[in-house]
Image (cartoon, grey):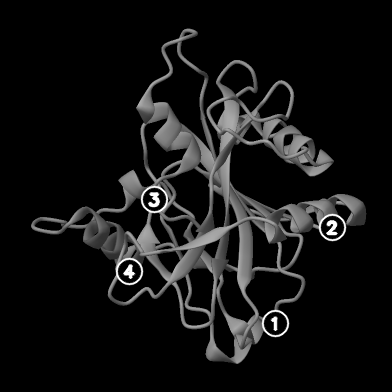
Amino acid sequence: MNIVASGARYRVIDDFLPPDELAEIRSVMQHRRFDEVASVIYPETDGRAFRSRGAVLRQDTGTPTAESREQDAQPAAFRTILGELGAHPDMFGAPGEDWSAVGFSFWQYPAGSRLGWHNDVATGRLGEFVFFLHEEWKASWSGELVILDADPDTVDVDTTGMSAMEAVEAKASQASHALTAIVPKPNRLVLVQEGTIHCINRVDPTAGTTLRQTMTGFVAGSAPEPGKRSMDRLTSLLGSDQAP
């Protein structure tokens, strides 16, 4: 694995998993049930996407917590992913201190679908990762993860009268910073800092039946006292909203 791109709010790591771990996690994904979900950004125009049931991984063991009700044998890739997240404390904080678990789901975007500009802000979230799992992707198929690599608070835009989503898109549209487009290359891991404005470009019709497939997860703050886990933390981990 190697870091091939890095910005103020993101990192791109290519050839992330060895072949055996990549094959194993793809097998886990293929055996998941996927449900069609409406976009929470622009449901009329974003198109359809498909999401698996969410699960929560414990940072200390790489195994699911009781919150996830996950019963499958755990691939080594889960521990590899958690280890990589822990290797970037400047983005997510220290594992075991600032965060103790990661929630994830598998996602599939068919040709014609996209996800509008958003920032994935939720209580307790420290950041997220996107891991591309499809076996092939051509640049002409689009579907890029596009990032505004700037602190949203520094983008001065008059958002009076705008909805939250409109305000996010206005910042992406009017920021002086150039947007960064990350091609969904297979076995590519992208780390994104909390609150970063981003979107998914529409998957081109030339992709045909090929699905843009990802494992997407959220890093959340350490758990409250035992027996006092909050619904806010579960929402932050499992991501009740749509994800890249």
Q: Nearer the viewer, residue 81 or 55?
A: 55
Give the number of the disc on residue 23.
Answer: 2
* Mark 4 or mark 2, whichever is nearer to me: 2
Q: Amino acid at mark 1?
A: Lys
Q: Position of residue 167 (x, y in %)?
A: 23, 58
Circle 3/circle 2 CB separation < 8 Å = no
Residue 61 is left or right of residue 160, and the answer is right
Residue 145 is left or right of residue 174, and the answer is right
Q: Nearer the viewer, residue 200 or 169?
A: 200
Q: Position of residue 163 (x, y in %)?
A: 17, 57
The reply to whether residue 23 is visible in this rendering is yes
Classify residue 168 by image quadrant.
bottom left
Circle 1/circle 4 CB separation < 8 Å = no
Classify residue 57 by image quadrant.
top right
Q: Nearer the viewer, residue 1 or 230?
A: 230
Q: Position of residue 171 (x, y in %)?
A: 30, 60
Mark 3 vs 4, N-terminal side: 4
Residue 29 is left or right of residue 41, and the answer is right
Mark 1 vs 3, N-terminal side: 1
Pointer 3: what residue? 241
Find the distance from the CA under tag 1 to the CA under tag 4. 26 Å
Q: Amino acid at mark 4?
A: Ser
SS assignment at label 4: helix
SS assignment at label 2: helix
Pointer 1: what residue? 138
